[in-house]
Amino acid sequence: MTLREFEYIIAVGDTLSFSRAAELCHVSQPTLSSQVKKIEGSLGVTIFERSNRRVHITAVGADIIASARRILREVAVMRETATTAQEPLAGRFNLGAFPTLASYLFPQVLPKIRKTLPDLSLVLREEKTDVLIEELRQGTLDAAFIALPVDDPALIAAKLFDDDFYLAVPADHTLARHKSVPTDVLREHRLLLLEEGHCLRDQALDICHIVGSGGQTDYRATSLETLRQMVKIGSGITLMPKLAIEPSDDTIVYLPFQGRPPHRTIGLVWRKTSKRTAIYEAIIDMF
């Protein structure tokens, strides 16, 4: 068996489709199918049950796919170790961030990374936090900017900064004339939230729970920019992280909270087994 054949069975396992797996692996479907049959014949087991309409992973097939993933991860670590030994601050580097952070942090930090690490070939990835964590585990990401804490024994997290939340209200809102507001004000007003799956939504709901507010449920935005537009037209108010504030926009007023403001803590996260420590340390030093 070859590493390429392992990639084939993983692709079929991920897509549950031989045609889509072939596209992902850039081979013809007959080629991929024959190679999968070859692996099954070599092992003497059925990895996939096939029908005209669907592909099903057998119990033993799930174990074999999991083993194939582990093997490919170990090979990736081996290659990374060799590359790092030769050029510790060079090579391809896959860096991720979640959507409510990526659009605002990447433009700030990328020029610094390029200046400090000019030989590093950056590949950026924007995804929700749970996807980023899984890709870190699988080895398809080298590091990611994630809201802490991250509770995973396979990963290391280093705090970078706290990003305070502000209350975003329309310029003609009754609160707009205030210089700051208490968090209790969230009990009295309609709060717009992101859709489920965004860590910023979870953070906002945590804040709402602390102050005894519910948050609006009949509208859920897909992005911070959508939330911003909804605030502009007077559909409600929302929590906006400082990093995403646009001070030149006079249609929205961003109010700081009184006392210790609610915030999200942003960190750099990577695998414990990674050998690219010099790069992680260089990025951390930029904050």
Image: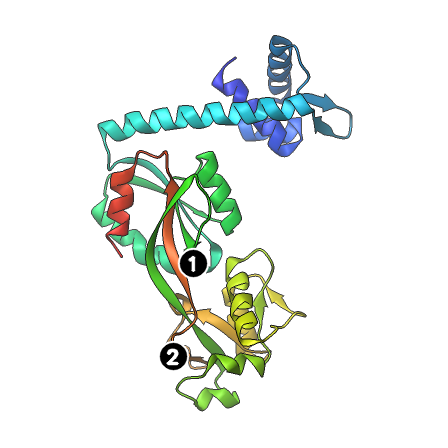
Secondary structure beneath label 1: helix
Which residue is disc 2 drawn over? 259
Q: What residue is shown at x 27% (from left), y 42% (from top)?
A: 279
> Where's residue 235, x and y in %?
60, 78
* Left or right: 56 in relation to 81: right
- Residue 171 in the image: above or below residue 85: below
Quick one: label 2 or label 1, which is nearer the N terminus?
Answer: 1
Q: Name the residue under label 1.
A: 101
- Residue at the extreme right of the image, as rendered: 52
- Identify which amino acid the numbered label 1 is placed on: Leu
Which is nearer the eye, 122 or 97?
Answer: 97
**What amino acid is labelled 2 in the image?**
Gly
Of residues 225 and 270, the one drawn nearer to the viewer in this rendering: 270
Residue at x 22%, y 49% (from the top left corner): 115
Mark 2 or 1, which is nearer the eye? 2
Rendered residue at 37%/77% (across/down): 248
Q: Is mark 2 on a helix, strand or loop?
A: loop
Image quarter (top left, top right, bottom left or bottom right) of the C terminus? bottom left
